[in-house]
Amino acid sequence: FALGALVRGLGADSFPGLMDWLIATMRSNMGVVERDGAAQGLAQFFSSVPPVWLDRMLDQFLADTASADANVREGALGFLSFLPVSLG
């Protein structure tokens, strides 16, 4: 929850490129620990920005759950599993 607190406290503008990096890492062929960490960080990020940010991206994350790439599917499912806890 530290990442969410940082974004909430300092603002998303203080972390340019963070969302894109988290998404890329979540979809990468890195290990499961890196993908899960990025998925959790991204869920925390979205809990700290206006809801419209998530609204713009949610369809893509849902589409990722049906990706032919197992890493992309796993990252998207991890993100969706962390999201309810992060949003409270």
Image (tube, grey):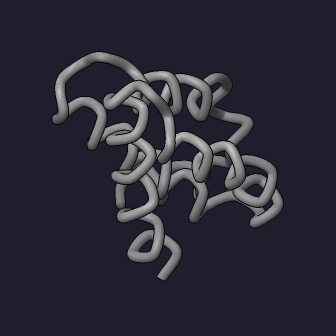
x 45%, y 46%: residue: 76
In front: 47, or 32?
A: 32
Residue 53 image offset from top left, x and y in percent: 77, 53
x 24%, y 30%: residue: 34
Image-quadrant location for residue 9 = bottom right
Residue 8 image offset from top left, x and y in percent: 60, 58
In the orientation shown, which residue stands out farthest toward the top? 29
Q: How many marks?
A: 0
The quarter in which the N terminus is drawn is bottom left
Q: Is residue 83 left or right of residue 60?
A: left
In the orientation shown, which residue stands out farthest toward the bottom? 88
Looking at the picture, does residue 14 appear above or below residue 58?
Answer: above
Residue 86 image offset from top left, x and y in percent: 44, 69
x 48%, y 56%: residue: 43
Looking at the picture, does residue 29 appear above or below residue 38?
Answer: above
Looking at the picture, does residue 6 appear above or below residue 84?
Answer: above
In front: 7, or 47?
A: 47
Residue 10 image offset from top left, x and y in percent: 62, 48
x 52%, y 31%: residue: 23
Image-quadrant location for residue 30 = top left
In front: 55, or 74?
A: 74
Q: Is residue 33 left or right of residue 83?
A: left
